[in-house]
Image (cartoon, rainbow, N blue to C red):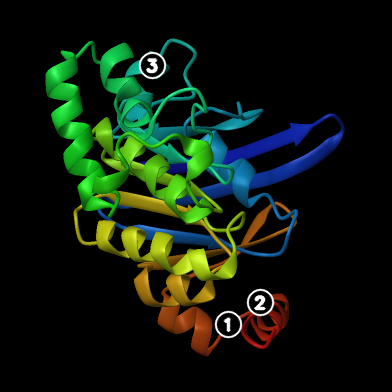
Amino acid sequence: MIKINNLSKSFSHSKVLHDINLTIDTGETISIIGPSGSGKSTLLRCMNLLEIPDEGSINIDDVEITDPNTDMRLIRENIGMVFQQFNLFENKNVLENVIYGLLKVKKMEKVEAEEIGKNLLIRVGLGEKINSMPQNLSGGQKQRVAIARALAMEPSILLFDEPTSALDPEMVKEVLDVMKDLDHKGYTIIVVTHEMGFAKNVSDHIVFMVEGKIAEYATPEEFFSSPKTERAREFLDKMLNK
């Protein structure tokens, strides 16, 4: 599904990603973890070209999305993105937020789009909030709206950029529960996260990044029971005993 070759990215004079190579199979759930500033979110954002790599290539379903001739608009229709800060339209209600892409990008009839939106909101536990405005929702509810909005476009790939880091602790579980449910639906899911329980119990593989490089790539069982590098051992000790 996704093949990344020799990917590098710099901001100003600082190199954030160093020669990244990674293959993600269709239907896998991948957790990208590591200390702050290790390049996790930059790598994720390169996967739908929110950040443009300086070197290397990214192929999705044998299409090189880093080729300037590729129509990225069509690629993005197949990639859902959930951000740390929700990014909802504050002047639109919950249902309007969810169906926005269906109306504007897919040019769907409003009645059909609303039916899809309502079903998705029920699926994420917000069926009673379809007419609510974002400012009247909790952080966990806003993030679930953002997930429903991403699902509305029927993507095969879902990217999550630290989706729980802006939430109060009691709201984290409700978002993670929705994400765990998605793991059984056939999506290819890539998550940048600090939630070690999710990474351990839901992921097919762990990508552990340090200073812009992939320091370890392993199954959760391998990574959490016997990490290969001292830096990974230090990271896990800190995260699991905080």
Compute the Cα span from label 3 to label 2. 37 Å
Between tags 3 and 2, which lies in front?
A: 3
* Mark 2 Cα shell of 10 Å, populated few (<14), some (14-19), many (≥20): many
Residue 181, image x and y in percent? 26, 62
Residue at x 49%, y 32% (from the top left corner): 88
Give the mark, 3 or 2, whose residue is nearer the N terminus.
Answer: 3
Tell me, for residue 144, which label it has, or none. Answer: none
- What's under tag 1, amino acid-wise? Pro
- What's under tag 2, amino acid-wise? Ala
Residue at x 60%, y 81% (from the top left corner): 228
Q: Find disc 3 in the rendering and name its residue.
A: 73
Q: Find disc 2 in the rendering and name its residue.
A: 232
- What's under tag 3, amino acid-wise? Arg
Give the mark, 2 or 1, whose residue is nearer the N terminus.
Answer: 1
Kind of element beneath mark 2: helix
Quadrant of the rendered image containing residue 177: bottom left
Between tags 3 and 1, which lies in front?
A: 3
Compute the Cα span from label 3 to label 1. 39 Å
**Is residue 140 shown above or below 53?**
below
In which quadrant is the N terminus drawn?
Answer: top left
Residue contact at pointers 2 and 1, CB within 8 angstroms: yes
Kind of element beneath mark 1: loop
**Is residue 30 shown above or below 96?**
below
Residue 11, image x and y in percent? 78, 32
Quadrant of the rendered image containing residue 168: bottom right
Residue at x 19%, y 55% (from the top left corner): 185
Residue at x 29%, y 26% (from the top left corner): 99
Residue 77 relative to residue 136: left or right: left
Q: Find disc 1 in the rendering and name its residue.
A: 227
